[in-house]
Amino acid sequence: MQNFLDQFWPSTVDGLSLGAIYALVALGYTMVYGVLRLINFAHSEIFMIGTFAVVGAVEALGINSPVGTLALIGLIVVLAVVAAVAAGGSAVLLELVAYRPLRRSGGSRLAALISAIGASLFLQQLFAIVVIPRFFDRPLAGGHLPVQSNDFTDPVNLFSIGSVDFRSDKVIIFVGALLMMVALDQFVSRTRLGRGIRATAQDPETAVLMGVNIDRIVMATFALGGAMAGVAAALYMMRFEETVYTVGFLLGIKAFTAAVLGGIGNLRGALIGGMALGLLEMYGSSIFGAEWRDVVAFSVLVLVLMFRPTGILGESLQRARA
Amino acid sequence: MASLRAVTGTVARVRDGWASAPGRVRWPVYALLVLGALILPADSIGSFMSPSSNWSDLLFFPIGGYILLAIGLNVVVGQAGLLDLGYVAFFAIGAYSMAVLGKLHGWDFWAIVPVGIVIAAASGVILGAPTLRLRGDYLAIVTLGFGEIIRIVAQNTDSIGGPNGISGIPHPPTLTEWAVPDVQPFSGLGLGGLQPFTYGALDSRPYYYLMLLAIIVVIVFVVRLNRSRVGRAWAAIREDEDAAELMGVPTFKFKLAAFAIGAAIGGLTGVIYGSQATSIIPKNFEFMVSALILAAVVLGGSGNLPGVILGAFLVAWLPERFRALNDYRVLFFGLALVVMMALRPEGLLPSRRRKAELQEGTGGMGGLGAEVAGPDGDPHEAKAEVTG
């Protein structure tokens, strides 16, 4: 307990920057779930593809030494765009190959979930066996070993409040994620496409009758969710500088937990859920020790669902279904 | 495509005939199936089925183990319509019961079997009681979380070995030294001299027969259950929970029962697995096992026992049979799941009752939210166009 009090503020900073990444990945789960009622299990692999796009882009840009804070912000924007395009593109491809045929034939949600698990396995192995050995050849590293990105950030202490340090990478993650959230929220609530997404989430049949092109909406949902995972991947790589073909698995489960925690189908809920989960994990590991971090996260999920089954903010992108 | 349709047509006709077959036809077929299962470990079969690894090891686990797990998960997913993504937890609880009680407390295997089953069923009730009031998808994520919690707790608890697990788990005691006589036809099959009730460290065939016995007992239990009031209640819950509740079915009680029975079968598998494995580590119980068992259930035909058994067999056997492809087997397995769901989402041998539900609506699990096919019209018509 003493440890918890000592570590309270540093844990808060860590928790918020970790939670920001959860929240960005959670957006992809929550949007797809809102529109299709599908747990897009392969979304974690979309994130994984994003991290490898970042490694490739850093290499292609010829960066192999840390850059200053201002240049870092510019670089992160470039990397985020590259990763968002790669991840968003993969997500659309995934929809076309794995889910659209099922939607057409009226398959059950269970079948779609199995298809998602299959796609997830396929993408992981595709990277481990084919993509990583061929395109990310590192000395010592086969396709199953972690891949380090060229070192491009050298976190400096931006400012301190009391004894609490705010490192540049953590601040960039938090601010960057928040900006993306606001942008997405505005997009969904103000544009024509966003209105289509909300309409489909609410009632697909009526939406079709009102002239909404449902295939376009689903595709846009996957593209947006994938792009958010790509941005998350860029921020993640700035902080951890290492990825592996299974990097998405646990992070994906956590992000889905965050989406449920905040109220699935609810964009702002994903933000709240992600931040809450990040904070709880960090507080939990300072109390019980780091190895119990995941147990804390899942126990909190079970408790929240018992007492508030629709999550913290409830479900708003869709109508709540009993 | 035409030949494929001919095959599925024949299968459908055979299954229609079987459904109305009288007992005097059924019992000989059951007897033949059991006989076939008894001679399955023969070397001549093994050399074709698994040229690169020990066939009787495979038959015990993963093949036999996956089949038993799939039958258990089928009670939860296929019969009651509850989505469980953390089924491996009950398997782990059974295996750890065997390891802890057998090694640390010196219990006998036959005493651990009922205790392991009760512990697993009780943990199913403890998990189910607070979560079964949730809707399907939340149940899925909570069970997934529970599966991970069990594994991480095992990994972090030093008194049960932590990440190194428990080794030196005792084997079941020898029942009798009786051996199959080494004469024809047994010697021709390669079964001569086999001691089917002597549980040693080398031969896994006795363990396979143990697993087979468990599978047969569980199948009889599950089939009887499905034809009873309980089975009808599960079908009602699966098809429309609200309607079932209004008709006076205590849905929560029956869902909890399905969860506990599924957990008990998972625990039983764990105990038997632990008795042969001699050592277990938390890494044996990762999420991937839950995913594979669920894939087996859905691939074979959720809700239909022969389908589920076939699915589990394929999921366990195919990657081992094609070991030559080495790294690529998981890749192809993933691809196969995607293709299979696109071509035949109801599974290889769909449940007859489930098929009727699927044609009528969404088969209990609900359809994809945006399944409306747009200008192509009715989704089922669109399907007929593709296949017809």
Image (cartoon, rainbow, N blue to C red):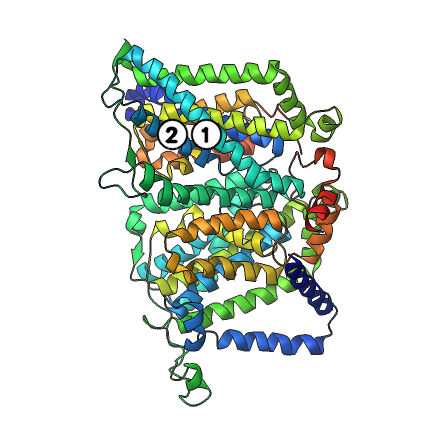
Relative depth, front residue between A80 and A304: A80
Near mark 2 (Cα within 10 A), the count class, few <14, some 14-19 or many ≥20, is many
Please identify the quarter of the rendering in which residue B246 is found. Answer: top right
Could you say where residue B163 lies in the image, as x and y percent from the top left? 30, 48
Could you say where residue B68 lies in the image, as x and y percent from the top left? 51, 61
Q: Is residue B217 left or right of residue A163?
A: right
Asked if residue A163 shows in the view, the reply is: no
Amino acid type, residue under disc 2 in the picture: Ala
Task: Have a look at marks 1 and 2 and say if they share a chain.
Answer: yes
Q: Say which residue label 1 marks.
A: A87
Residue occupying the point 38% across, 24% down: A234
Figure quadrant of the N terminus of chain B: bottom right
Q: Is residue A281 left or right of residue A152?
A: right
The secondary element bearing badge 2 is classed as helix
Could you say where residue A133 lies in the image, as x and y percent from the top left? 31, 41
Relative depth, front residue between B116 and A102: A102
Please identify the quarter of the rendering in which residue B58 is found. Answer: bottom left
Instruction: Write down the chain letter for disc 2.
Output: A
Please identify the quarter of the rendering in which residue B372 is found. Answer: top right
Q: Say which residue label 2 marks.
A: A53
Q: Is residue B38 left or right of residue B323?
A: right
Amino acid type, residue under disc 1 in the picture: Ala
Residue occupying the point 73% across, 48% down: B359
Relative depth, front residue between A311 and B312: B312
Pointer 1 or 2: first along the chain: 2
